[in-house]
């Protein structure tokens, strides 16, 4: 994914705070009904092989990827026509108003503008892909599957030329091995979406005089999903009590070493439409949590430390995985202890990733499960739709609420920015009023950088975790 964003450009790109910025399209117009988008293409742009970028290349690229059955983007399913009135204009018409269209067009994969010469026969939308030819700042020099990719400057790039002549992206699956590679100088930069750094290694990195730490606010959150089929969790007071029992400050300060912030909502403030006003969430108040449980009719009948109601103990199955997120285990253990303090017995179940995702998406074999929001351009619209909205085939993955689904639909169909903000205010308020999840923390993106690297700056998306074009080195 990182390589795609370096080699290819989109019509538009994702900027800070989710702002949509010009890329291969210098400007665009949207019809009043929100269904037609006319893009005015940047002139004088060439692909890395020297061939001209024009409207026909855009049409070829779109027709190639929108017919891929594995593509699930709404921009593809909603597209009804793509016209090229001239070589510098592309008009797309959709079957409905769907404001995230521009956001989805920033995705480096699959929404890449590919040269027709990149396939054989050239220009055939079903042709065999033979070479990565894009308009981005970089070109592929060599590639070894699951090992490394070497990229060099694209001399035909339409923007400012990168300072470096070459970048090597190396695959190092083991987090501790990444730290060792940083220490011995075999890699200059690691972390963030390039490959997470283990939190327990931060003191080692901070103590190495060859390395600097680069920290930036992330765009994801870690939280708890509730299973609405559980009779205890169907009680609003129980869900609220769980939220109030979690000491988020302790999670951030004591477990995460301060690398992150307390979550007061489903999304961090780096995500579009998230404001201080609509992110109040729940604080830490175990006494109020106990009161809510008493109000709901729970008491410790047999004095074993676990509350019950009608003879049914308040016990919950708490599922997580730690292969991808090792910090979830100590976080779950802390939350388990805090829940026990208010009379809720949470039994931890650590699953392998495949079993974990099967439990989350298919079998629903959990009462509570730790999950995370998607990153950057998928938020907030895509994540809300995928987790909290039902389809014709299945109910919502997380909490199911008809009013919330109506609010999500209203936000997605809005053509007015002010109305859209109001719609998201309503969505976030509904999520919190009904305690449909339990927010825990917002992780920061953390990179370790060799001090010989200059101008290292975190990017705005997972597709471009580092602003590669600005990097330079001093020997």
Image (tube, grey):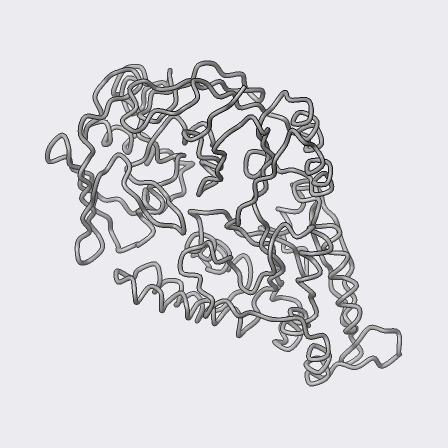
Given residues 308 and 152, the one toward you in this image is 152
Q: Is residue 222 above or below residue 4?
A: below
Left or right of 3, for residue 117: left
**Image location of residue 451, percent across then percent down:** 58, 29
Q: Position of residue 39 (x, y in %)?
A: 20, 41
Could you tell me residue 234's position as x and y percent? 62, 72
Question: Of all residues shown, which one is farthest toward the left?
Answer: 85
**Quadrant including the C terminus:** top right
| Number of numbered tags placed on the structure image | 0
Q: Quadrant of residue 206?
A: top right
Q: Is residue 396 left or right of residue 10?
A: right
Quadrant in the rendering for residue 410: bottom left
Q: Which residue is at the far right?
A: 303
- How far across and down, in percent of the image, does residue 262 sit? 61, 60
Quarter occupied by residue 92: top left
Q: For the point 26% across and 62% down, which residue is it?
A: 416
Q: Quick check: 92 left or right of 326?
A: left
Residue at screen point 40% across, 38% down: 71
Image height check: is 40 above or below 347? above
Name the residue nearer the viewer: 380 or 203.
203
């Amino acid at each position: 994914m990182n390589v795609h964003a370096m080699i290819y450009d989109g019509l538009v790109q994702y900027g800070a705070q989710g702002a949509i910025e010009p890329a291969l399209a210098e400007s665009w117009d949207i019809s009043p009904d929100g269904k037609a988008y006319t893009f005015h293409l940047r002139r004088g742009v060439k692909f890395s092989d020297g061939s001209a970028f024009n409207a026909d290349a855009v049409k070829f690229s779109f027709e190639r990827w929108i017919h891929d059955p594995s593509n699930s983007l709404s921009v593809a399913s909603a597209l009804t026509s793509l016209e090229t009135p001239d070589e510098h204009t592309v008009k797309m018409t959709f079957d409905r108003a769907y404001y995230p269209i521009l956001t989805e067009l920033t995705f480096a994969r699959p929404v890449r503008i590919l040269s027709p010469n990149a396939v054989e026969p050239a220009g055939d939308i079903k042709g065999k892909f033979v070479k990565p030819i894009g308009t981005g700042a970089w070109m592929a020099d060599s590639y070894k599957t699951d090992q490394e990719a070497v990229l060099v400057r694209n001399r035909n790039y339409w923007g400012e030329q990168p300072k470096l002549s070459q970048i090597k992206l190396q695959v190092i699956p083991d987090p501790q091995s990444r730290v060792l590679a940083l220490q011995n100088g075999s890699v200059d930069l690691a972390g963030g979406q390039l490959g997470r750094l283990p939190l327990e290694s931060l003191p080692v990195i901070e103590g190495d005089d060859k390395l600097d730490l680069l920290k930036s606010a992330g765009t994801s959150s870690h939280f708890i999903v509730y299973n609405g089929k559980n009779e205890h969790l169907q009680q609003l007071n129980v869900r609220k009590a769980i939220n109030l029992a979690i000491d988020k400050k302790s999670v951030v300060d004591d477990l995460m070493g301060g690398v992150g912030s307390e979550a007061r909502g489903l999304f961090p403030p780096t995500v579009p439409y998230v404001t201080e006003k609509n992110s109040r969430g729940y604080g830490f108040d175990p006494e109020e949590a106990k009161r809510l449980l008493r109000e709901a009719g729970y008491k410790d009948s047999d004095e074993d430390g676990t509350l019950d109601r009608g003879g049914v103990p308040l016990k919950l199955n708490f599922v997580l995985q730690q292969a991808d997120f090792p910090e979830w285990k100590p976080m779950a253990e802390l939350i388990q202890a805090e829940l026990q303090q208010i009379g809720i017995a949470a039994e931890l179940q650590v699953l392998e990733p495949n079993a974990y995702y099967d439990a989350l998406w298919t079998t629903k074999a959990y009462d509570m499960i730790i999950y995370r929001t998607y990153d950057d351009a998928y938020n907030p619209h895509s994540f809300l739709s995928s987790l909290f909205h039902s389809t014709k085939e299945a109910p919502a993955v997380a909490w199911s609420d008809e009013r919330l689904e109506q609010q999500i639909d209203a936000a997605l169909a809005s053509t007015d920015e002010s109305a859209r903000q109001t719609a998201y205010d309503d969505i976030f308020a509904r999520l919190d009023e009904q305690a449909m999840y339990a927010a825990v923390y917002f992780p920061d993106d953390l990179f370790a950088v060799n001090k010989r690297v200059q101008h290292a700056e975190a990017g705005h998306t997972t597709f471009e975790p580092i602003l590669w074009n600005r990097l330079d080195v001093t020997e």
